[in-house]
Amino acid sequence: MPTNTLRLGVNIDHVATIRNARGGRHPDPVQAALIAVQAGADGITAHLREDRRHIRDDDITQLKEQLTKPLNFEMAATREMVDIALKARPHAACIVPERRQEVTTEGGLDVVRQHNHLVPIIAELKAAGIRVSLFIAADEKQIETAAFVGAPVIEIHTGAWCEAVVDGHDTMAAIELERIRKGAARARSLGLEVHAGHGLNFETAETISALPEFVELNIGHFLVGEAIFTGLTDSIRAMRAAMDRGLARRPAV
């Protein structure tokens, strides 16, 4: 069923990236999270990677203690990360693929191939009261398998579409956007809650916000980069405004 509500999750990973480039405590990603909430974020996303390249364990602890909005814990499907999630008890856990040599998450989780591995992990997280989402491509088989393994939420990887838009590849952008649109519609028909993330900027966030199946966008790198020029508060408010413009174009429910 379409919806006319849309949440903004702000990913603070790359505030931690800047901090870790010099060591020490500045800039503090927890402070960034609190500023993001004050600026209008509906939740905070943080990815604790195996190599701790940006977010660290103590960041997760502090976020859970200080946030007044939901924490979305991005994690690989490993025993270590499951144990950390069970201890921290975030509002949500988004399971993502992770390769140590990648610069950022390069694609969606292969739920079809990892079906047997994911089923007990999803069940364990859900039993602890953690909302589970799977970060996947807008592929019909992946979406259907996500529903089959018991994940109530998917987050569609928007990276290929966003790159095509930025690079001016209009034909490819149109193909990718249609793939996302069809995938989101299929997910909603299966009863899944649909989120989107990766590579979104003001333009692409406004476009995808007009699609009625989406209830949440998770955006980080662009907002942190934009904050260098305008400040974090203004970058988040501008993103919220872009999303609201898209939301206003949705069909009436």
Image: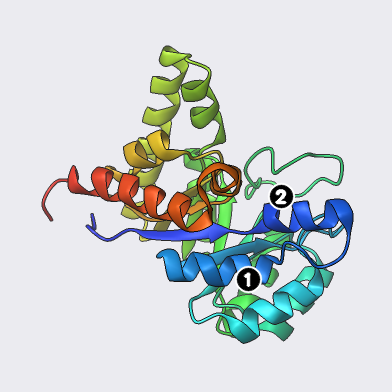
Q: Residue at the location (72% across, 42% down)?
A: 104
Q: How is the image coloured?
A: rainbow
Against 252, is 199 above or below? above
Tell how many labels.
2
Quickly name the residue at label 1: 31
Judged from the image, the secondary structure of the residue bearing numbered disc 2 is loop
Horizontally, residue 54 falls left or right of residue 165, namely right
For the residues bearing labels 1 and 2, Cβ distance under 8 angstroms: no
Judged from the image, the secondary structure of the residue bearing numbered disc 1 is helix
Question: From this viewpoint, which residue is outermost toward the left?
Answer: 252
N-term-proximal mark, 1 vs 2:
1
Crowding near the residue tagged with mark 1, few <14, some 14–19, many ≥20 C-alpha atoms within 10 Å: some
Residue 93: in sight, yes or no?
no
* Spot occupied by residue 143 in the image (x, y as percentages of width and height): 49, 48
Which is more toward the observer, 183 or 100?
100
Against 75, is 218 above or below? above
Horizontally, residue 107 falls left or right of residue 209, namely right
Q: Residue at the location (42% across, 14% down)?
A: 170
Against 244, is 139 above or below? above
Which is more toward the observer, 228 or 208?
228
Amino acid type for the residue under numbered disc 1: Gln
Which is more toward the observer, 243 or 184?
243
Horizontally, residue 59 falls left or right of residue 197, namely right
Crowding near the residue tagged with mark 2, few <14, some 14–19, many ≥20 C-alpha atoms within 10 Å: some
Q: Residue at the location (33% across, 44% down)?
A: 242
Quickly name the residue at label 2: 97
Residue 85, picture quadrant: bottom right
Against 42, is 237 above or below? above
Residue 161: in sight, yes or no?
yes
Q: How far apart are labels 1 and 2 at the CA level?
A: 27 Å
Task: Name the quadrant of the C terminus.
Answer: bottom left
